[in-house]
């Protein structure tokens, strides 16, 4: 018999887990006993927050669960920010931690918390303690099944240190996995009837519609509908698609567009504050909401149609059902109006963030089509999320809801580990880079050809502008930065400081061919 810690690694490998991110410690050392024997790759982070962000980036790149091993107490609390980000953005991350056996009668123990399990529950779908091998195995399967059968959100399992080191039988065979909920035939008929009957239907595609990406171009052509995508849904509607308003939903004027529709179909999106940046979308017509999360459907108004089911399956079924009942319909929106709106919104961004759009355009031109981008909370990303039409879905990842600084570098490391041989790019601001800069050591250790583009404006520019708009004298928005290129070289990474956009493009191409990551420092004066 082996220890439970060892058997957990064997169980995870049997369930398809190939990579674990984490940091070993005296409390969770038993989790590390079986990793190599099970054939799992372990990635050593420099901070537990980085480990959980890496698991998040891995999960977004693959669609598989990202797993991290953490120690009792501070190991978990260090990771809570990253787990909160995964919860906000519906990312399947499994955090497995050790815990103390007794925190009630004993005091002053190493890493002691009042209630570790409850702390994790604040940012996870659930957090549970396993006090026996059977409970540990059941909770792991509960998490993995939940990731596949509904809205994926992080889960936390903690195991007392003595239980991890105790003997355990192997885990049981993999149980059958439940499927996502599916819309009924009646729901499909109602949706198709409503879309074909509408004079000006408008589709809003969110990240939850990714499974139906292949059907979306035909569906838009068949219905003559216009469309938006949320930031998380970028790439679902290919660039150049007629009547495509882009990812400009957060523009205030987009409310006027929604008010013109006589039917809005929101698929796989919360339509949250971070999607709209206003209280309501702006439509006055009925809405069809399609989602796997019943809590989202509870927001439907009287007269709306709420459909619980997998958006991808329903989109594919619609694309089949509609041509069986009608010919391709002529456009129901004016193409000139759509183009004028897009041009107007881009001009607004050029006025709000002068100098940024040309840099973004140059980066887009130089980036390989299959590149995956991880961005941080930085003005560069805020502008790019609107003006950069992605050519494929699921290839730009951002800390949308929770809005955590420091996300991009470790998440990009997780994404690069998940996709060896394919290009990955991290985009950060000068301030956010310093939140998780230590993970450069992990990227160098792994030999990742990872370009890390730092938009260095020497300040918290977004906060400064917010203060000015609020008539507050800017305060605490300028900090002394290190020499980022020297810092990169100190870690063993490459560094570049291009003076022109052409040099930036060349530095990016070289970085994709390098044997270690490359920090590329770009300043607002670049032309």
Image (cartoon, rainbow, N blue to C red):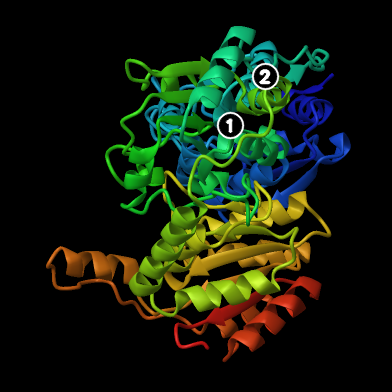
Examine the image and state in which quarter residue 70 appears.
Answer: top right
Residue 69 left/right relative to 356: right
From this viewpoint, is residue 46 visible? no
Q: CA distance from mark 2 to mark 1?
A: 22 Å
Q: Could you tell me which secondary element the residue under label 2 belongs to?
A: helix
Q: Which mark is residue 54?
A: none
Measured as percent of width and height from the top left, residue 237 is found at 62, 46
Query: Which residue lies at the image location 45% right of the left edge and 45% below the top edge?
Result: 81
- Crowd around label 1: few <14 · some 14–19 · many ≥20 (10 Å): many
Q: Which residue is mark 2?
A: 145
Could you tell which of marks 2 and 1 lies nearer the N-terminus? Answer: 1
Identify whether 133 is placed above or below 386: above
Residue 50 left/right relative to 109: right
Measured as percent of width and height from the top left, residue 443 is found at 69, 64
Q: Nearer the viewer, mark 2 or mark 1?
A: 2
Quadrant, the N terminus: top right
Query: Which residue lies at the image location 58% right of the left edge and 38% below the top edge?
Result: 224
Query: Which residue lies at the image location 50% right of the left edge and 49% below the top edge?
Result: 231
Examine the image and state in which quarter residue 107 appears.
Answer: top left
Q: Could you tell me which secondary element the residue under label 1 belongs to?
A: strand
Which residue occupies the foreground of this view, 354 or 217? 217
């Amino acid at each position: 018999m082996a220890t439970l810690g060892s058997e957990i690694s064997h169980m995870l490998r049997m369930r398809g887990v190939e990579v674990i991110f984490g940091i070993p410690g005296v409390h969770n050392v038993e989790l590390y006993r079986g990793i190599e024997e099970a054939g799992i790759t372990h990635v050593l982070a420099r901070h537990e927050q980085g480990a959980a962000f890496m698991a998040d980036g891995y999960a977004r790149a693959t669609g598989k669960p990202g797993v991290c091993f953490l120690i009792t107490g501070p190991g978990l609390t260090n990771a809570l920010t990253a787990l909160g980000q995964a919860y906000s953005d519906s990312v399947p991350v499994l955090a497995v931690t050790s815990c103390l056996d007794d925190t009630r009668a004993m005091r002053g123990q190493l890493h002691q918390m009042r209630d570790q399990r409850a702390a994790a529950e604040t940012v996870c779908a659930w957090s549970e303690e396993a006090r026996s091998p059977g409970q540990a195995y059941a909770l792991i399967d509960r998490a993995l099944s939940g990731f596949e059968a509904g809205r994926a959100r992080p889960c936390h399992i903690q195991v007392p240190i003595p239980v991890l080191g105790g003997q355990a039988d192997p885990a049981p065979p993999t149980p059958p996995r439940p499927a996502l909920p599916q819309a009924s035939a009646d729901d499909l008929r109602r949706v198709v009837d409503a879309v074909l009957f509408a004079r000006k239907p408008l589709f809003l595609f969110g990240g939850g519609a990714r499974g139906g990406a292949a059907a979306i171009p035909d569906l838009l052509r068949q219905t003559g509908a216009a469309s938006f995508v949320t930031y998380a849904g970028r790439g679902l509607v290919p660039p150049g698609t007629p009547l495509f308003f882009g990812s400009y939903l957060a523009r205030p004027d987009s409310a006027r567009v929604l008010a013109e529709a006589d039917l809005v179909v929101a698929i796989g999106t919360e339509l949250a504050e971070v999607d709209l940046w206003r209280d309501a979308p702006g439509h006055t017509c009925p809405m069809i909401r399609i989602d796997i999360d019943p809590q989202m459907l509870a927001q439907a108004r009287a007269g709306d149609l709420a459909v619980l089911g997998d958006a991808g399956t329903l989109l594919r079924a619609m694309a089949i059902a509609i041509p069986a009942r009608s010919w391709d319909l002529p456009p129901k929106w004016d193409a000139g109006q759509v183009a004028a709106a897009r041009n107007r919104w881009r001009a607004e961004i050029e006025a709000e963030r002068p100098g940024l759009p040309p840099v973004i355009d140059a980066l887009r031109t130089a980036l390989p089509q299959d590149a995956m981008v991880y961005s941080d909370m930085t003005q560069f990303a805020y502008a790019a999320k609107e003006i950069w039409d992605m050519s494929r879905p699921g290839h730009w990842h951002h800390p949308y809801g929770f809005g955590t600084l420091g996300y991009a570098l470790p998440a990009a490391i997780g994404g690069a580990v998940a996709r060896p041989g394919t290009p990955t790019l991290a985009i950060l601001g000068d301030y956010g880079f310093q939140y998780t800069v230590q993970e450069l050591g992990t990227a160098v250790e792994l030999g990742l050809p990872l370009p890390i583009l730092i938009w260095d404006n020497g300040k918290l520019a977004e906060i400064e502008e917010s203060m000015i708009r609020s008539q507050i004298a800017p305060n605490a928005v300028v900090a002394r930065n290190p020499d980022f290129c020297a810092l990169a070289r100190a870690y063993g990474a490459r560094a570049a400081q291009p003076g022109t956009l052409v040099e930036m493009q060349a530095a990016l191409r070289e970085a994709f061919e390098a044997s270690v990551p490359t920090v590329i420092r770009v300043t607002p004066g670049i032309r």
